[in-house]
Image: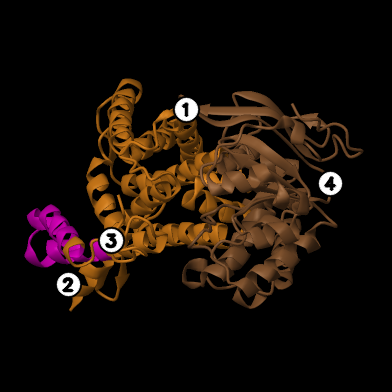
């Protein structure tokens, strides 16, 4: 019983991180119909920004804020000066472009920050809370992880549902030409979409790095899980991304706890295949198939 | 080139002068001139392939003409771009409506009202009090237009499940909410029943106290009853222009609709 509880709590925390990463992918997919493979190295770079500040003696929270802010700027710059120039009618060009960005950002990080492993602090305890004699698998940092991702989700929902900017972003995502005709500055909305996505990605980077080690490819493993989570949710639905992240986190934690940790990656792919076989559009897809 | 500057209203409305468009070797529009004076309804008719759609796309900036001038309220706008239309007070509807299927009817209309929002990005993100007020004003404005078109009760539905005539009204509401000075209607009557067509005709007439309207339409009944002036296109050229009763009797028009080849007749200009 206690092992199940521990496993579920670990899965919940992990799932939240996947959810954040998946959310970042979904935001960009919705805005520009591009799967951003460079999401991981972008988050890695902004985590380094935080690390440099923290190692220079500034507080964790200053580093945290700086990482999110640099995510905002980086996302906007990448959209405005790189993505903007790719032919949107082509299926393969944006994929190659973001993969290229992946490699470039990796190399850049290794060049600027070095390729060695560096430890990243956590703002809260990394030991489980004590209840009587037993230690439960929920750490202070785990609670912070869950709350911060939830806060991001709530803020995004508020932004998209209840603000004029959010409405324009949704309209631009749905039909750029019509939105433009109605006077929406579509270009700005796309830049903003990428910027917000990069902020959410940066958050996932900070959460994964917390209490662990940072090196240029520390986020790469998350790409797979985050992508699986996003596809599980339907790639088009922010709610789906969060649900996909949680489902994946919990299942992988169960697999790791009861079957064997070496099977985790395999399990992720098995879940992905199972869902895609039953619901090709993902769990939360509004359309079952896309006409090509 | 027909004289379009003679009227008292010259410069106050929308005008095209000598507009030509070619796609590769295919001439879509050839030396087309027309004027939509303030508070008037101009109908553009012609057989299929006459260039009506191209003409509309030039008027809203989708297509840049190879030659000719565009005038709007006394200023030249040859490099008209779609995203600047709303700011200029021009709205257009699309043949395929272009509704945002995942947004509610009210939200669809609110996107169109964006030109009247004075909010900034940051105040929106931070949900400043003035901003919320502004947002509510937008929603109210959109709601009022829905009400005027008789579809206020559908505000919270998504357009996806609605019947075509209702979807058309949503698209019209979205164009009207911006309170344009010029409304471009692309086939407002297509897919409507006779009764609905009469309603839409009445509605269009009712708009002329606030705006000018230019419409492209196949249904002669609607065009004849609604338009103040009509321009007839055939093979990209203006073959006739004038009041509905004049155009109806025009031999060149009759010939064009019966499929005979008639040379362009600039001398026929009567507007």
Q: Residue at x 73, y 42 (%)?
A: B241
Q: Position of residue B263 (x, y in %)?
A: 62, 32
Residue A281, numbered label: 3
Q: Nearer the viewer, residue B198 or B231?
A: B231
Q: Residues within 10 Å of mark 3 (few under 14, many from 20)?
A: many
Which shade of the palette goes to chain A?
Answer: orange
User: Residue A258 colored magenta?
Assistant: yes
Dot placed on the residue nearer the N-terminal end, 2 or 1: 2
Alpha carbon distance from label 1 to label 3: 31 Å
Marks 2 and 3 in Cβ contact (< 8 Å)? no
Give above or below for B173 relative to B178: below
Quarter residue B97 falls in: bottom right
Residue A114 appears left or right of A88: left
For the residues bearing labels 2 and 4, Cβ distance under 8 angstroms = no
Estimate the x, y position of residue A49 in percent, counting from the top left: 43, 33
Instruction: Measure how far apart labels 1 and 4 are at the Cα level.
Output: 43 Å
The Cα atoms of the two marked residues, 4 and 3, are separated by 50 Å
Q: Which chain is displayed in brown in the rendered image?
A: B
Q: Secondary structure at mark 3?
A: loop
Quadrant of the image occupied by residue A245: bottom left
Marked residue chain, label 2? A
Q: Which residue is mark 4?
A: B38
**Image quarter in which the N terminus of chain A is found:** bottom left
Residue sitting nearer the eye, A179 or A47: A179
Residue A170 on the magenta segment: no
Residue receiving disc 2:
A3
Residues at marks 2 and 3 on the same chain: yes
In the drawing, what numbered circle is on residue A81?
A: 1
Q: Secondary structure at mark 2?
A: helix
């Amino acid at each position: 019983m206690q092992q199940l509880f521990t496993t579920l709590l670990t899965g919940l925390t992990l799932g939240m991180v996947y959810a954040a990463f998946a959310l970042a992918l979904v935001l960009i997919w919705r805005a520009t119909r591009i799967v951003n493979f460079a999401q991981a190295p972008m988050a890695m770079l902004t985590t380094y920004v935080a690390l440099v500040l923290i190692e220079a003696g500034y507080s964790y929270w200053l580093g945290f804020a700086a990482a999110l802010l640099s995510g905002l700027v980086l996302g906007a710059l990448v959209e405005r000066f790189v993505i903007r120039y790719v032919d949107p009618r082509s299926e393969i060009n944006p994929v190659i472009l973001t993969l290229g960005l992946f490699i470039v950002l990796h190399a850049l990080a290794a060049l600027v920050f070095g390729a060695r492993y560096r430890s990243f602090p956590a703002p809260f305890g990394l030991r489980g809370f004590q209840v009587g004699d037993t230690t439960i698998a929920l750490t202070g940092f785990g609670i912070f992880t869950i709350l911060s991702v939830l806060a991001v989700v709530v803020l995004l929902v508020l932004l998209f549902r209840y603000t004029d900017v959010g409405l324009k972003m949704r309209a631009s995502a749905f039909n750029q030409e019509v939105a433009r005709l109605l006077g929406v500055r579509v270009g700005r909305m796309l830049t903003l979409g990428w910027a917000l996505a990069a902020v959410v990605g940066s958050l996932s980077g900070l959460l994964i790095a917390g209490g662990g080690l940072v090196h240029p490819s520390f986020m790469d493993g998350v790409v797979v899980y985050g992508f699986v989570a996003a596809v599980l949710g339907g790639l088009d639905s922010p709610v789906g991304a969060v649900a996909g992240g949680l489902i994946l986190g919990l299942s992988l934690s169960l697999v790791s706890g009861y079957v064997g940790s070496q099977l985790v990656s395999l399990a992720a792919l098995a879940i992905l295949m199972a869902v895609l076989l039953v619901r090709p559009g993902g769990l939360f897809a509004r359309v079952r198939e896309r006409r090509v | 080139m027909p004289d379009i500057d003679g009227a008292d209203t010259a410069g106050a409305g929308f005008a095209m002068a000598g507009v030509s468009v070619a796609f590769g070797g295919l001439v879509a529009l050839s030396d087309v001139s027309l004027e939509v004076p303030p508070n008037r309804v101009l109908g553009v008719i012609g057989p299929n392939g006459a260039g009506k759609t191209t003409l509309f796309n030039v008027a809203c900036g989708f297509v840049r003409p190879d030659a000719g001038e565009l005038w709007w309220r006394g200023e030249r706008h040859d490099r008209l771009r779609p995203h600047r239309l709303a700011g200029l007070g021009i709205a257009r509807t699309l043949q395929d409506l272009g509704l945002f299927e995942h947004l509610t009817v009210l939200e669809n209309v609110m996107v169109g009202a964006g030109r009247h929002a004075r909010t900034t990005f940051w105040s929106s993100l931070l949900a400043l009090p003035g901003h919320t007020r502004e947002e509510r004003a937008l929603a109210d404005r959109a709601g009022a237009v829905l009400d005027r078109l008789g579809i206020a009760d559908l505000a919270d539905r998504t357009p996806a499940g609605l019947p075509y005539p209702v979807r058309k009204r949503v698209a019209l509401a979205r164009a009207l909410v911006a309170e344009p000075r010029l409304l471009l209607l692309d086939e407002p009557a297509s897919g409507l029943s006779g009764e609905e067509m009469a309603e839409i005709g009445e509605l269009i007439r009712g708009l002329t106290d606030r705006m000018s309207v230019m419409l492209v339409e196949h249904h002669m009944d609607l065009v004849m009853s609604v338009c103040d002036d009509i321009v007839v296109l055939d093979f990209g050229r203006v073959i006739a222009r004038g009041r509905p009763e004049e155009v109806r009797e025009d031999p060149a028009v009759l010939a064009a609709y019966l499929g005979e080849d008639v040379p362009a007749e600039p001398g026929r200009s009567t507007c």
